[in-house]
Amino acid sequence: MDFSLSEEDLLLRDTVRELCDQQVRPHAGAWDEARALPPELLPGLGQQGLLAMERPEDEGGAGLSTVAATSLVEELAAADGALALLVSVHNHLGLAHAAQGLRPGPRAQELPALTDGRHIAAWALSERGSGSDALRLSTSARRDGDGWVLQGEKRYVLGASVAQRIVVLATTAGAGKDGPERSRLEEVVALLVDADAPGLERSEPVRTLGMRAAGTAHLRLDGVRVPAERELGDPGRAWADAMALLDRSRVGMAAVACGIGRGAMEVAAAYAQEREQFGRPIAEFQAIQWKLADMATTLEAAWLLTLQAAWRRDVGLPFGAHASRAKLAAARAATVACSEALQIHGGYGYTREFPVERALRDARLCEIGEGTNEIQRLLISRAIAERFAA
Ligand SMILES: Cc1cc2nc3c(=O)[nH]c(=O)nc-3n(C[C@H](O)[C@H](O)[C@H](O)COP(=O)(O)OP(=O)(O)OC[C@H]3O[C@@H](n4cnc5c(N)ncnc54)[C@H](O)[C@@H]3O)c2cc1C
């Protein structure tokens, strides 16, 4: 396995690190309080190629490998988990789904703005009754003349508050949602919807524990008309496409978790040198040293799993179960590391004066979004069972 970055990738990572130091880290706490990112931030990231990391250069993207893109997401997350997750979801779900699913005409119309940061694409699968059991969709897509009509609700759509486009997964099954799994799979369609289409209503940003600047909203879809050419992918394939995109996106979520954890660890390590109790820096107490040692070890292990999943994708090997392992390990490592980082700060860590409480709140979502820890275990164990099936 070779996780090394090219000279060019390293230069880009340094640029992103600098951007984070100057334009992100100092403001991330205020964005979290405001529950919003400044409007000029995303177009700026678009100009740096961060909103089309894996799109080819001749289409305006940065043309990065999965390993290189994963490193940038980790870097962003060390400064601001909410921003990093929004960037990851746009790249790996919204934009990726549009780029692979649109036919040439609408693709030429849609992709430039989704690539250069003028448009953000959110991705809406979850519903009130369908979370982990994601196939149990109720949002319906009905064919009508030269297009589709959407009816239903979507819950917890990250980035929906700021998005101009939303990929909506819906079922053509009508009342048949309890039918056999095979037919339910084939009845799913994915549509690229204008966020300001008549009949589409976005809630106020949901009052979440963390990732508050990422603008998560619920959607109500009441007779939303979508032109037929905005259907993504081949008929009957939308579910398989969505699951494959989620595999890719989980590598991004794992990178977000690793970055949040590393960011919190670095803040805690610096604090431990400065804070004195009993006449010496708390970094001299073995209890604190061991916390930092454990954080470094579990985060590094998770990061290696993340790079491994990214690398497997780059070289064309199956990587879905590896992505699940990486996400499971990284999300858990990040939550524990952030909690320990808070502990190292004592009472100060429990306040908004230090970034570790935000890191802990942000990290917690990584154990839930894009499939909970329990669902990752289910996917991993399913892959093991397949391997050892007689
Ligand atoms: C801030 C935020 C942003 C989100 N962004 C998006 C987004 O952009 N797009 C989108 O589509 N969705 C999004 N989601 C939704 C997210 O993907 C779901 O919340 C998640 O998949 C879990 O679904 P649920 O909340 O319905 O929980 P449930 O599925 O109801 O699960 C409840 C509990 O039961 C467990 N459980 C369920 N089934 C099993 C099983 N078979 N075995 C063992 N345990 C099980 C779960 O692990 C969990 O602990 C977001 C959620 C949040 C909070």
Image: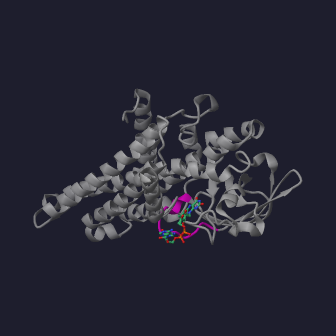
Above or below, 237 relative to 172: above
Q: Is residue 38 left or right of residue 336?
A: right
Q: Could you say where residue 283 lies in the image, as x and y percent from the top left?
A: 17, 58
Q: How many marks?
A: 0
Pick the residue in front: 231 or 264. 231
The residue lying toward the viewer, choosing from 26 and 344, is 344
- 277 to the left or right of 91: left
Residue drawn at the location 37% of the way across and 47% of the way down? 305
Depicted 55 relative to depicted 148: above or below: above
Extent of the magenta region: 204-214
The secondary structure making up most of the magenta span is loop
Along the line of sight, the residue nearer the viewer: 217 or 148: 148
Q: Quadrant of residue 36?
A: bottom right
- The question of residue 160 being in magenta is answered with no
Taking the view exactly as shown, the residue that stands out farthest to the left is 279
Above or below, 158 relative to 229: below
Q: Residue at x 65, y 41 (%)?
A: 100
Across and down, in percent, residue 303 comes to 36, 48
Q: Position of residue 171 (x, y in %)?
A: 72, 61
Q: Would you identify the image quadrant in which residue 6 lies?
A: top left
Residue at the front extreme of this rendering: 390
What's the colour scheme?
Answer: one colour
Residue 256 showing in the rendered view: no
Q: Residue at x 34, y 58 (%)?
A: 333
Q: Quadrant of residue 75?
A: top left
Is residue 190 at all visible to an observer of this figure? yes
Residue drawn at x 79%, y 63% as measured from the top left: 199
Residue 165 appears at what percent x and percent y?
A: 69, 51
Front residue of 276 and 102: 102
Q: Is residue 205 magenta?
A: yes
Q: In which quadrant is the N terminus drawn?
A: top left
